[in-house]
Image: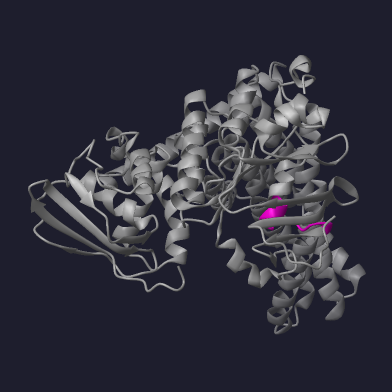
Amino acid sequence: MENRDISAPRASWQRDHAGIQLVLSGDWLRDGSRPEISGEDPGKVAESYVTGDLGEFDSTLPAFLLAMFRDRGAADPSLDGMPENLRGLMELALSVPERIEAKSQADQRSPLAKLGGVSLSVWERLTSVAEFVGLTLFSLGRFLTGRARFRGKDFWLIVQQSGVEALPIVILITFLIGAILAFVGNVQLANFGANIYVADLVGIATLREMGVVMTGIMMSGRTGAAFAASIGSMKANEEIDALRTFGFNPFDFLVLPRVIALVLMMPILTIFANVMGIAGGMLVGALVGIPPALYWQETLVSVTLTIASLGVLKSFFFGAAIAICGCLQGMNAGNSSAAVGEATTRAVVASITSVIVIDSAFAAIFTLLGI
Amino acid sequence: MQNPETPPDAKISIRGLTMAYGSFVVMKDLNFDIQERDIFIIMGGSGCGKSTLLRHLIGLREPAKGEVFYDGKSFTKTDEEQRGDFIHRFGVMYQSGALWSALTLAENVAMPIEENTKLKRKEIDELVSYKLSLVGLAGYEDYYPSQVSGGMNKRAGIARAMALDPDILFLDEPSAGLDPLSSRRLDDLILRLRDSLGSTVVIVTHELASIFAVGNNSIFLDTATRTQGAIGNPSELRDHSDNPAVRLFLNRGDESESSKA
């Protein structure tokens, strides 16, 4: 086949005593030139074929013929005159009729209807969040009355993953945040010769906001995403259906332990974060000339137990919000690997957003209460 | 073991192949040839390394020892970058279909065509619907793999494997999980494709009906000895193999049938 010249593929219509004929010639190859169609097109399929000059062909020829049959609505066209191998392929391709009703899968709505669909889906998403929170509360109720079933081993594994294993990153980041706060504060306060107040600044900012918010954001990216990905891929593998058929409530089994674990671990991580933030500030303080003993004393004076408890109080809510966002997106994921990725993205976005929103709500409440 | 110095002249040749996972040897000393236009069956009990052998043939795993040749050229000794020339001639269908789940059936078949040819959109669409028609999936172009049955996923996997009219088609358990009629249709499809396109087909399977219907040559992987149990036409092996394990396998464990030979 290497020695022979490749000739251009041709299809020409002709009409004689034998009826409508399609003459196929040349080499029909994917990398060759496009077929040339000549003659008077009868608008229907040929009654027979002339293939004496047909050279080599790959799938392009049967694909061309099949598309022509489909266009012209021929369900059982004549294949007379085709060489044996082409005929065999055409018979095979035509042996199962096309599913017409299957075709209507593609979205054929008007742009306006699509826009409406998008708007409605926002509302649907909000109600689904409310529904999910409600289901979580029910599940928690079952847990408190001893009727929810999940495996203790799973629970402790989740506690380990969202607690101890998250500790190094939380410690590192909050230590650096404390140090950055102290640096920035020192530059400004030194102008007034008041750089001892760096300790107040770092202490109050860390305990009230930075410690818990940074922990919340880190846990959204780390644990919220992990929850969404693991539940989402279980969904894609029909594992959640398998739980259901064995009589386990997937909600109690998957969502509940994650919510409880994170609600318990977030305050502990937050306390670590707070201590490390102050330690970071103290290190910078020492570098700019505030002795650690003095820094510590100043921190103790400025920080009250009320302030220290505010951050920890918020962390319970953040933990619940992150776990619920992650599990919600996982449980609502589609059945494909791409859907798992989308669910993870949505989970991280939703949990960071909810952390910030809840934090703002708390800020408003604390201001009203004058704390 | 044949002399490794002379390059083999078959379509695919395996010389002294040993497959291992770490220090665990799955199969050792495999030597066989697959001729052009063969429908070659890789058979053996569950877990004997059939799919592993297939993965060695297509380069997803490297042999612990030995070589794989295509048309006398060593595939094993070709480095990663130059393997493209070999791999473009392969069409592979994986055990569970392995369709890209984010793409529709049509997009799954179209992707290799789009990336490897300069065809226009309309021509690609024609090719795709032809390939899907061949496996009996006409009209399912816009479905996602998760929306159709397991058998349909499998057939779509075959359509994708055939997307580029490959020289050699590798099918991993094509008929497992299909109903008898679909399985029969699939055998028919494989035979017709071989006859009209002249492809070489390598099939991993343990479905006896398919083995006898399509296979003209085969290798039996023996779990007990961890090497090839027999090579040859499956129907002949069933009746005349001197390896009792092979006769037992091909007679569905029927002692009286297998001891007749």
| Viewer-closest of A160 and B56 | B56
Q: Is residue A50 left or right of residue A159?
A: left
Residue A127 point in image, percent of width and height: 43, 35
- Give the magenta part as a residue range: B55-65
Q: Is residue B56 magenta?
A: yes
Q: Is residue B144 magenta?
A: no
Whether residue A357 is visible here, answered yes or no, is no
> From the viewer's perspective, is residue A231 above or below residue A58?
above
Residue B9 point in image, percent of width and height: 67, 62
Rendered image quadrant of residue B40: top right
> From the viewer's perspective, is residue A136 above or below residue A90?
above
Residue at (82%, 47%) from the top-left corner?
Answer: A164
Residue at the outermost bottom position = A191
Residue at (69%, 20%) from the top-left corner?
Answer: A148
Whether residue A184 is visible here, answered yes or no, is yes
> From the viewer's perspective, is residue B165 above or below residue A181?
above
Quarter holding the N terminus of chain A? bottom left
Rendered image quadrant of residue A146: top right
Q: Is residue A63 left or right of residue A127?
A: left
Residue at (74%, 32%) from the top-left corner?
Answer: B46
Residue A13 point in image, percent of width and height: 14, 56
| Viewer-closest of A89 and A368 | A89
| Viewer-closest of B196 and A235 | B196
Residue A44 point in image, percent of width and height: 13, 46
